[in-house]
Image (spheres, grey):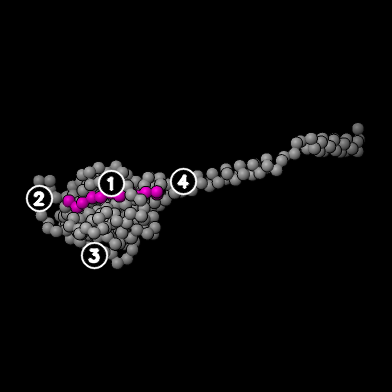
Amino acid sequence: MGVEELITGNERIRRGKKRSARKQRAERPKQGFFRTLIQVLGELLITCGVILLLFVVWELWWTNIEANTAQQQAVSAFAQEFQGPVTPPPADAPPVDFGPPKVMAAPDQASTVFGVVYIPRFGKTYSRPLVEGTAPAQLDTLGLGRYDSTSMPGAVGNFAVAGHRQTHGAVLDAVHTLVPGDKIYVQTNDGYYTYVFRNNQIVMPNRADVLAPVPTQLDAKATERFMTMTSCNPRFGAEERIISYSVLDSWQPASAGPPAEIAAQVAANKKAG
């Protein structure tokens, strides 16, 4: 068989395959408009699902990593500048009355880190920066923000802070686990303030009276030193607010050293810097 015959035969085979393919396409049932629409919608839903999943991963995982790093750096920076011993008084030392708590002036600028909060119920190593302001610029990065309309640590009235529960460091994720009698320690350059937890309360987001000098009692005159922590409720929602109330139990100046329960973490923060 010559080359020309081979070429002719090959062309004949190709034409036959093309005719067969056209015939199969012609015999194939045509896809209706609604079927095509459903397929397109299905693909769009799958794409949206993937995007939503990525957003959830970013919101619940990556924002926590970023915020935790920033908060650890802020705590370390505060600890390096803190003047005072990091060892507690001897266990057999007689109790000392340090008089009324010293109260620092409120920071002039938002985002100023002016203290550290320790809550042993949340873990032995729990220590978070205390920052001025409750805007996203503070809460999304630096942790527990003070409402600027409320008192400073140790003052008569209501020292109130806010913090995220599931994102951006999740500083108050375990707030629902507090039980009456739990200690909350606040460290500033002046010393250490020990608050004792009393109770939680679930309220609607518009309940601004929880920030009153006497929480929830707008017309009452404060005689005690309160600490109020606010966060979203439930844990993965924001329909409500969970409010945690504590009252000052004692205080000690920086020169006296930290309370024994948090001394190890105070020293670790100093060393980390």
Q: Which residue is mark 1?
A: 200
Q: Which residue is mark 3?
A: 105
| Residue 31 location (% of width, % of height) | 72, 39
Question: Element under label 3?
Answer: loop
Q: Pick the quarter of the image with the N terminus.
A: top right
- Magenta range is 238-249
Q: Which mark is residue 95?
A: 2
Q: Which of pointers 2 and 1 indicates the residue nearer the eye?
A: 1
Q: CA distance from mark 2 to mark 4?
A: 50 Å
Q: Is residue 173 visible?
A: yes
Q: Is residue 119 left or right of residue 42?
A: left
Q: CA distance from mark 4 to mark 3?
A: 40 Å
Question: Element under label 2?
Answer: loop
| Residue 89 location (% of width, % of height) | 14, 50
Q: Which residue is mark 4?
A: 57
Tell whether position 140 is magenta: no
> Sequence-wise, which precedes: disc 2 or disc 4?
4
Tell whether position 241 is magenta: yes
| Residue 246 location (% of width, % of height) | 23, 50
Q: Amino acid at mark 1?
A: Asn
Picture quadrant where residue 19 is located: top right
